[in-house]
């Protein structure tokens, strides 16, 4: 094809027709065969680039179509070279009239002279001498990059360039996609390969029913895929984004709606929770329930009295009193002649729950047992035997509860604490221990505040109850942030607090995912603190200690026999010592916001003012300039800033989402997101409207057609079945 004659740059228009793509697809373009062909055989890829695409999770043409841009650059307006501004990014078009390469101070500098009707500019690259041969004299070139003007001369540094050989440009003269990359791939390569795939978008099956697209004003999937990669206008780009966002969230909600319908279709237990049981709950608890706790208990009571299984999520901030509600619910189940099981993610939390619940239940003649991976086999056998005979009314445990050798005489209630640490399959394994014609009620609890939109996404198969009120008397917690160079100030403050009779926690730095190294760090830190505070009683707590040793240490701390408890994050949940008023966290910027908030919640439980002191790397100095806003901060610095500014768990959860994203914060894989594909484009905070809309539509469809047997739903049924297979492969792997 002949090169275009050089004229004024306006002849390249953003609104041109799609035309023939610059590269043909390197295999037959017939339906699914083309979509599922290896990416290696696409024009411009080959074996080496295919390996790079593999690192991005792209193996087939279909995968590549779903490799979505992370942002866009508007390159629709060409600028005359004469009018270019220093420091701006600009798009220019012209002819190459010369080139040169020189060496200076160890650098190889290549310059290509580009000329248009208004002037000339040097396109400049460092250590890329091959550019001189790539763009010979006479080449019609379009270039985009940062402009530098010095003493009247114009240069464009490290520009992205395309040779004009037709009317179609994948990366110039339009709104240009910017993709996630890896070593061995450039933006230009990815764009050109994708541009050659655009004709295949018409062959991508659209599983979203036409009635849903019409109702929600959504474009078709082929149009969305075309316009998400190469939009002609911002309006087309937004319409494509909205369609893909809706479909992602819709599939999640469809799965959750189907799961909920399937769960409640089983026969449940209609518990009788009358005034007599409510009165006993009041007698058992050593304090009066807050209005929020009472409201939530009434919601759970109404569920338990229904002849269908309860599936409810109990959400409350640190210290809001979820355990008291769980105790009340467990008592109701036991008084109806059933057993209750509470599963916790760690042994120390299970031990704390056991000690607290045994103090409440034993005076009422109810046997409470503890089952974890620790302890002697003889003791575990005895607990399992009591569960089988029904002698145990309430059992507290860890993952040990879902082992095959654990069975119940009459399991009626399952409580799962810190739900975000368990997968759906683990939750279901305990729930299925009922072994009777009816299935148990299920109550899952989390102290990690979750924004409503994320709760609907992760736990849409559960009804939601929220304890949004702290018990009276809880003290506000003052949070301060120190560089490690100011650790002596922290020690002085600790010394003052201990002198006043208070107690404190000192949490060790998070080294890496190694229990042994983490424990060794705690031992070393405890020894250092004994030297700093020789007159104080220093305790040590970590996950590799034996159960009895951990329990004895916590009991000594609770009894005031330990002044300063050095610990790993095993104290994150379940520890309640009212006299502990100081929480010191080393290397705090290496912890997540949710974990920091949980650790901070260990103090502020008594009548004294409490403090959380965050120690970070000196390079994260809280007094450094620019910390007045979140611009230019590292993720660790942003987390510290949030912790200092608020103790509101829901606000912290939203900020954590903004910093890390929902997949990182809450482990979406374990919640079944793999079954519908990871969220590639949806954001549960930004896309709340689409989430609510998708949820409403999904629930209506499942209610009317639970098995998706209607012909219009065939595509949905196939898509979810394929996702099930993929999810099963992940679980097996």
Image (cartoon, grey):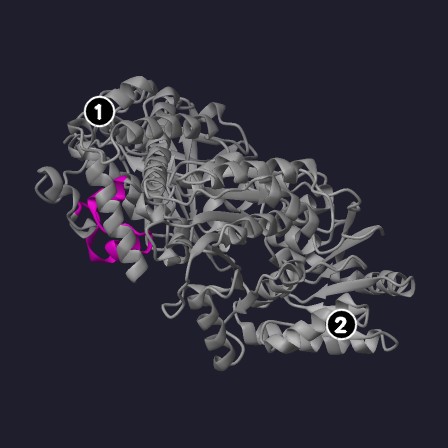
Is residue 634 in sight in this rendering? no
Image quadrant containing the C terminus: bottom left
2 or 1: tag closer to the N-terminus: 1
Q: Single out the mark in the foreground, 2 or 1.
A: 2
The residue carrying pointer 1 sits among few (fewer than 14), some (14 to 19) or many (20 or more) residues within 10 Å by Cα, namely few
Q: Residue at x 77, y 51 (%)?
A: 604
Image quadrant containing the N terminus: top left
> At which x and y percent is residue 495?
88, 65
The magenta segment is 42-65
Depth order, front residue of 404/317: 404
Disc 1 target residue: 18
Q: Secondary structure at mark 2?
A: helix
Say whether residue 51 is magenta: yes
Above-or-below relation of 458 to 531: above
Above-or-below relation of 10 to 63: above
Disc 2 target residue: 556
Depth order, front residue of 634/419: 419
In the rendered structure, the answer to whether residue 434 lies left or right of residue 190 reads right
């Amino acid at each position: 094809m002949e090169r275009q004659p050089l004229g004024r740059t306006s002849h390249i228009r953003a609104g041109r027709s799609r035309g023939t793509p610059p590269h043909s697809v390197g295999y037959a373009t017939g339906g699914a065969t083309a979509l599922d062909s290896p990416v290696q055989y696409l024009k411009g890829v080959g074996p080496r680039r295919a390996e790079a695409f593999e690192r991005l999770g792209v193996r087939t043409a279909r995968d590549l179509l779903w490799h979505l841009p992370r942002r866009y650059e508007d390159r629709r307006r060409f600028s005359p070279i004469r009018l270019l501004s220093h420091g701006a990014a600009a798009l220019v078009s012209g002819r190459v009239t010369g080139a040169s390469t020189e060496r200076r101070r160890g650098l190889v500098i290549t310059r290509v002279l580009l000329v248009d009707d208004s002037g000339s500019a040097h396109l400049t690259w460092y250590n890329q001498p091959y550019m001189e041969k790539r763009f010979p004299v006479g080449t019609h070139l379009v270039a985009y990059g940062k402009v530098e003007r010095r003493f009247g001369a114009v240069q464009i540094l490290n520009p992205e360039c395309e040779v004009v050989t037709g009317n179609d440009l994948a990366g110039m003269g339009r709104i240009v996609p910017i993709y996630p990359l890896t070593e061995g791939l450039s933006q230009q390569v990815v764009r050109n390969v994708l541009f050659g795939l655009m004709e295949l978008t018409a062959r991508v099956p659209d599983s979203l029913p036409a009635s849903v697209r019409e109702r929600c004003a959504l474009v078709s999937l082929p149009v969305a895929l075309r316009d998400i990669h190469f939009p002609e206008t911002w309006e087309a780009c937004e319409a494509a984004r909205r369609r893909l966002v809706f479909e992602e969230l819709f599939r999640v909600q469809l799965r959750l709606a189907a799961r909920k319908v399937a769960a409640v279709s089983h026969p449940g237990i209609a518990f009788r929770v009358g005034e007599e049981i409510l009165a006993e709950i009041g007698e058992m608890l050593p304090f009066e329930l807050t209005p929020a706790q009472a409201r939530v208990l009434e919601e759970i009571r109404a569920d338990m009295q229904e002849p269908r299984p309860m599936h409810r999520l109990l959400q409350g901030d640190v210290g809001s009193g979820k355990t008291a509600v769980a105790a009340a619910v467990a008592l109701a189940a036991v008084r109806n002649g059933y057993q209750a099981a509470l599963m916790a993610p760690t042994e120390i939390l299970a031990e704390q729950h056991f000690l607290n619940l045994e103090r409440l239940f034993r005076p009422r003649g109810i046997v409470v047992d503890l089952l974890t991976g620790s302890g002697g086999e003889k003791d575990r056998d005895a607990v399992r035997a009591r569960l089988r005979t029904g002698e145990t009314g309430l059992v507290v445990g860890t993952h040990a509860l879902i082992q095959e050798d654990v069975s119940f005489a009459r399991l009626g209630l399952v409580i799962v604490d810190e739900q975000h640490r368990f997968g759906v399959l683990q939750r279901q394994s305990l729930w299925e221990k009922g072994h009777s014609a009816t299935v148990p009620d299920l109550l899952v609890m989390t102290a990690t505040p979750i924004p409503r939109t994320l709760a609907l996404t992760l736990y849409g198969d559960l009804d939601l109850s929220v304890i949004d009120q702290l018990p009276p008397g809880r003290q506000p917690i003052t949070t301060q942030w120190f560089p490690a160079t100011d650790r002596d100030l922290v020690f002085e403050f600790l010394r003052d607090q201990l002198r006043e009779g208070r107690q404190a926690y000192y949490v060790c730095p998070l080294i890496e995912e190694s229990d042994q190294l983490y424990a060794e760090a705690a031992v070393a830190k405890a020894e250092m603190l004994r030297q700093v505070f020789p007159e104080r009683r220093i305790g040590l707590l970590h996950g590799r200690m034996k159960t009895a040793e951990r329990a004895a240490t916590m009991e000594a701390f609770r009894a005031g026999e330990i002044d300063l408890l050095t610990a790993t994050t095993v104290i994150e949940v379940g520890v309640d010592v009212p006299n502990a008023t100081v929480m010191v966290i080393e290397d705090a910027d290496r912890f997540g916001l949710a974990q920091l908030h949980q650790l901070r919640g260990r103090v502020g439980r008594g009548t004294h003012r409490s403090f959380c002191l965050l120690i970070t790397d000196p390079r994260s100095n809280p007094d450094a300039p620019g910390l007045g806003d979140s611009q230019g901060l590292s993720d660790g610095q942003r987390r510290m800033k949030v912790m200092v500014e608020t103790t509101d768990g829901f606000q912290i959860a939203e900020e954590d989402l903004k910093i890390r994203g929902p997949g990182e914060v809450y482990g979406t894989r374990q919640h079944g997101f793999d079954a519908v594909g990871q969220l590639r484009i949806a954001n549960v905070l930004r896309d709340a409207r689409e989430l609510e809309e998708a949820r409403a539509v999904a629930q209506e469809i499942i209610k009317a057609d639970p098995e998706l047997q209607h012909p219009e739903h065939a595509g949905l049924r196939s898509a979810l079945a394929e996702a099930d297979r993929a999810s099963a492969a992940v679980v097996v792997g």
